[in-house]
Image: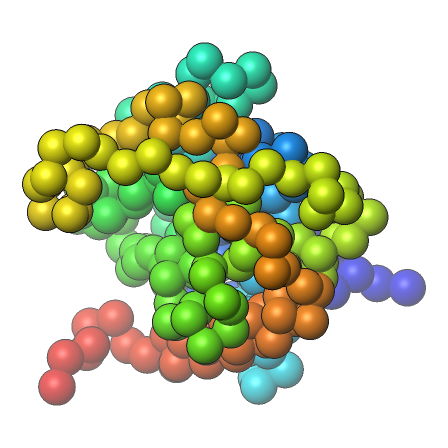
Amino acid sequence: MAGRPYILAETNWKTVRDTRYDVAILPWGATEAHNYHLPYGTDVIETEAVAAESARRAWDGGARVVALPCIPFGVNTGQLDIPFCMNMNPSTQAAVLGDVAAVLDTHGVGKLVILNGHGGNDFRMMIRELQPKVRVFLCTINWYACLDPKPFFNEPGDHAGELETSLVQHLTPNLVLPLTEAGSGHARRFTVAGLRDGWAWAPRRWTKVSDDTGTGNPAASTPEKGARYFDAVTERIGGFLAELAAADPEHLYA
Ligand SMILES: [Zn+2]
């Protein structure tokens, strides 16, 4: 039995040779502590699943899209004192992204979507620098910000909170500890008003912010909430992929 044709790691040269792909999706996660109850691979699990299901929806609608393997390491410079938070610096990410884009450019793939699942990653400046050097159209989505999560959750939370916990309960329930094992996810706020209110910005020192590495209360999480949210997110991103696949990068403005 053949793998899914829109997942590169599962497909084969026979399929790839005969398919003209319009869009490649590069899922990009992180490997880091997620409170006491979620796995280190949470961002990878979530982002791979969002990429796969969004690609399936677009593929089933006729768009030729393919999800590349997920890059598992994110920017974790604020978590260096937490064991096995596997930091990859932004400059390294830019080099990796440049190589991926160069490969796609050589093979004539017209568009690349970087599907980001980790708050410490930010591909916008990298895209600004890289875009003039390749013919591939580059864009990025933070899947966790593609729609308002408030209708789906009491308190979505930021890291290992209700949103992420519900999603992993839905996607890989065998990897989630009982919520009685989870910390409260209480996050201390900046004492300086501008930083606290968000109009000034500095990266957070995670061990000063949280005692359990979580920022967001997971108590009200359920797999049903995760399923509903996953459905809405992948519907939206699948629609985007289909629209992008059909779009002409030379005529994106009206
Ligand atoms: Zn996460």
Q: Position of residue 169 (x, y in %)?
A: 71, 56
Q: Nearer the viewer, residue 16 or 158?
A: 158
Front residue of this view, candidates 40 and 220: 220
Would residue 192 appear left or right of 145 to someone viewing this image?
left
Q: Is residue 118 left or right of residue 250?
A: right
Q: Position of residue 212 (x, y in %)?
A: 54, 30
Q: How many marks?
A: 0
Whether 221 is drawn above or below 233: the answer is above
* Rendered position, 220 above or below 196: below
Q: Quadrant of the C terminus?
A: bottom left
User: Percent x, y for residue 2?
Assistant: 84, 63
Q: Residue at x 75, y 53 (%)?
A: 172
> In the picture, residue 147 is in which quadrant?
bottom left
* Viewer-proximal residue among 4 and 231: 231
Residue that appears at 28% across and 77% down: 248
Task: Residue 247: tell me if it is visible.
Answer: yes
**In the shown orientation, is residue 169 left or right of residue 116?**
right
Give the left or right position of residue 51, taking residue 207 as reference. Answer: right
Residue 74 image point, x, y percent: 44, 33
Q: Quadrant of residue 78?
A: top left
Asked if residue 202 is positioned above or below residue 165 in the image, the reply reads above
- Quadrant, the N terminus: bottom right
